[in-house]
Image (cartoon, coloured by chain):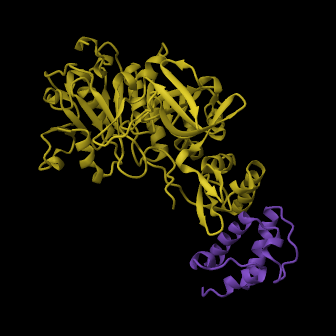
Chain colours: A purple, B yellow
């Protein structure tokens, strides 16, 4: 499974747990519009760290938090695992 | 006060109470004629007025030495088995130690201690120790980090709750505890056995639970005390089936409804009580109605010299059973200006009952929302296939922390069911807890550390 599909699948899982109705996860969709709150993102980042072995937001202290779903996924794709 | 009015441990031991026994896994001693012998080779008089470090490898010799030294030494510092040796020197300075009682005297040569007295199993002795003074009992706090604090008690304060409870008439109890008697919780049980005219079976570190229970049965144990962590292990081990104590006591950790109900089922004929006590504040109260928490009307009144209040969410106790001071060169004040000890245990009023919610220092912060790990563990522990659990904080770049949980499943729980159990636990958490308190990750582990004081270890892994 690609990094992207693993991220999408983790987001769907969390949406179900948190009772969030996800819109279609296009690259341009802003993270705000996903309906995720900061807790949901915190859970997503922790689970992806366990799944992919990386946490791009802790590694680089100056990393700007992404604004869109596409930027979020690229943050993971661009980190050498 | 003249020495005549001072009560020491030896006053509760006499030849008139026959059949009293103290045992551990290797020895079985009669308490009835214990005063006619000496575990110090008759050298107790040398300890008169001294500040004694009681450092023995096992509990039995320690118990005998406490009986012999109480009323003779100026003070005695009880060394628990898990004391970090690196802290010993500074503790000895703080307590002004000038004598050591030990079963390993060779280890103390060349260490500059004025007097080393070897302790062992009792031998007949003519040099009977006499009560000369009220010995100060020094105990160490069981915090997980840093140098432990030295807490000063008197026998009168330590036994306040025991005298107040007045041992029931009838057959004297045979006490046991999963604690070490050199810790406050265990010492309370040792003192109950001695003062109440009973017998005692001592715990053995590292002993398999089934062997412990066999020994408890062989010793005829009727009254037994441990932490909820101790009891959960016993309940899940299957060994409880062969054991039928008359009185089951919990203390040292929050007794949640799951463990109280479990004990009620396992021991239908026993009285089950959970007590609140701390090394500093002493025994606050015991609750015997089988429900978690405690009745709100215990707050505010002075019962048997114990007065409690709740301030800034934490339980405060002013009590004749409390320690009188921290001992040491830079020791902090033990009480506030009104004499209350801040226990650091946070409580919450719901209806007409207070519930313990956790330790002040243990709060997990999730993006500004807070939770006590104990609240989450209480929900997880309700699942019938869970032995024990620990909730903790995991660092998060988004919220600072998120809640994760480590869970130990009961022995015999089918490994193939772990996904189903995980789903059930999390569904239960979602139904009972706010979203930020639900573990983001739930991991099954083989075991969770329990400290030698019987408490779930909370150092962050």
Most distant residue in the front direction: B337
The image shows residue B201, relative to residue A59, as above or below, that is: above
Q: Is residue B414 above or below residue B308?
A: below
Q: Position of residue B123 (x, y in %)?
A: 18, 29
Q: Is residue B323 left or right of residue B132?
A: right
The x, y position of residue B149, in whole percent, is 36, 42
Query: Which residue corresponds to the image point at 88% horizontal and 73% vertical from the top-left?
Result: A23
Which image quadrant: the N terminus of chain B? Answer: top left
Q: Residue at x 77, y 72 (%)?
A: A11
Asked whether residue B52 appears in the rendered view, the answer is: yes
The answer to whether A36 appears left or right of B73 in the picture is right
Residue B156 against residue B227 in the figure, above or below = above
Q: Residue B129 at x, y = what percent?
A: 19, 22
Q: Going by the image, does B276 lie left or right of B186?
A: right
Quarter location, residue B238: top right
Picture coordinates of residue B389 (x, y %)? 60, 52
């Amino acid at each position: 499974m690609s990094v992207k599909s693993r991220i999408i699948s983790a987001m769907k899982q969390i949406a179900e747990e948190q009772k969030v109705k996800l819109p279609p996860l296009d690259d341009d969709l802003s993270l705000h519009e996903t309906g995720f709150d900061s807790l949901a993102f915190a859970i997503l980042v922790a689970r992806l760290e366990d799944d992919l072995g990386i946490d791009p937001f802790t590694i680089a202290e100056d990393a700007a938090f992404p604004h869109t779903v596409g930027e979020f996924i690229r943050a993971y794709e661009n980190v050498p695992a | 006060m003249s020495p005549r009015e001072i009560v020491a441990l030896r006053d509760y031991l006499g030849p008139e109470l026959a059949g009293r026994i103290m045992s551990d896994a290797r020895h079985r001693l009669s308490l009835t004629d214990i005063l006619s012998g000496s575990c110090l080779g008759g050298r107790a008089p040398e300890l008169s007025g001294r500040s004694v470090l009681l450092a023995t490898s096992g509990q039995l010799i320690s118990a005998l030495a406490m009986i012999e030294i109480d009323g003779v030494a100026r003070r005695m510092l009880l060394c628990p088995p898990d004391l970090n040796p690196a802290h010993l020197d500074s503790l000895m300075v703080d307590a002004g130690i000038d004598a050591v009682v030990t079963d390993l005297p060779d280890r103390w040569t060349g260490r500059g201690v004025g007097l080393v007295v070897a302790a062992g199993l009792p031998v007949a002795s003519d040099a009977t120790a006499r009560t000369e003074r009220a010995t100060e009992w020094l105990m160490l706090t069981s915090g997980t980090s840093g140098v432990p604090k030295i807490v000063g008690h008197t026998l009168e304060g330590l036994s306040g709750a025991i005298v107040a409870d007045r041992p029931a008439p009838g057959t004297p109890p045979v006490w046991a505890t999963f604690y070490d008697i050199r810790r406050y919780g265990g010492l309370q049980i040792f003192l109950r056995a001695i003062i109440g005219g009973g017998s005692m079976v001592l715990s053995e570190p590292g002993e398999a639970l089934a062997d412990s229970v066999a020994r408890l049965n062989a010793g005829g144990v009727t009254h037994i005390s441990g932490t909820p962590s101790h009891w959960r292990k016993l309940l899940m081990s299957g060994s409880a089936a062969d054991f039928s104590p008359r009185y089951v006591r919990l203390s040292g950790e929050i007794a949640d409804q799951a463990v109280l109900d479990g004990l009620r089922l396992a021991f239908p004929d026993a009285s089950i009580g959970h007590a609140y006590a701390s090394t500093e504040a002493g025994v606050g109260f015991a609750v015997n109605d089988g429900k978690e928490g405690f009745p709100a009307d215990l707050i505010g009144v002075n019962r048997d010299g114990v007065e409690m209040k709740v301030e800034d969410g934490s339980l405060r106790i002013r009590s004749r059973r409390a320690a009188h001071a921290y001992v040491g060169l830079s020791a902090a004040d033990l009480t506030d200006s009104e004499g209350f000890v801040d226990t650091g245990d946070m409580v919450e009023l719901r209806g007409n009952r207070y519930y313990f919610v956790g330790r002040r220092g243990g709060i997990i912060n999730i993006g500004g929302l807070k939770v006590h790990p104990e609240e989450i563990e209480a929900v997880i522990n309700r699942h019938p296939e869970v032995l024990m659990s620990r909730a903790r904080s995991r660092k998060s770049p988004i919220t600072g922390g998120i809640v994760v949980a480590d869970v130990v499943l009961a022995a015999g729980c089918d490994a193939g069911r772990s996904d189903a159990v995980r789903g059930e636990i999390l569904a239960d958490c979602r139904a009972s807890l706010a979203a930020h308190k639900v573990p983001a990750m739930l991991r099954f582990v083989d075991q969770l550390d329990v400290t030698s004081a019987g408490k779930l270890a909370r150092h962050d892994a």
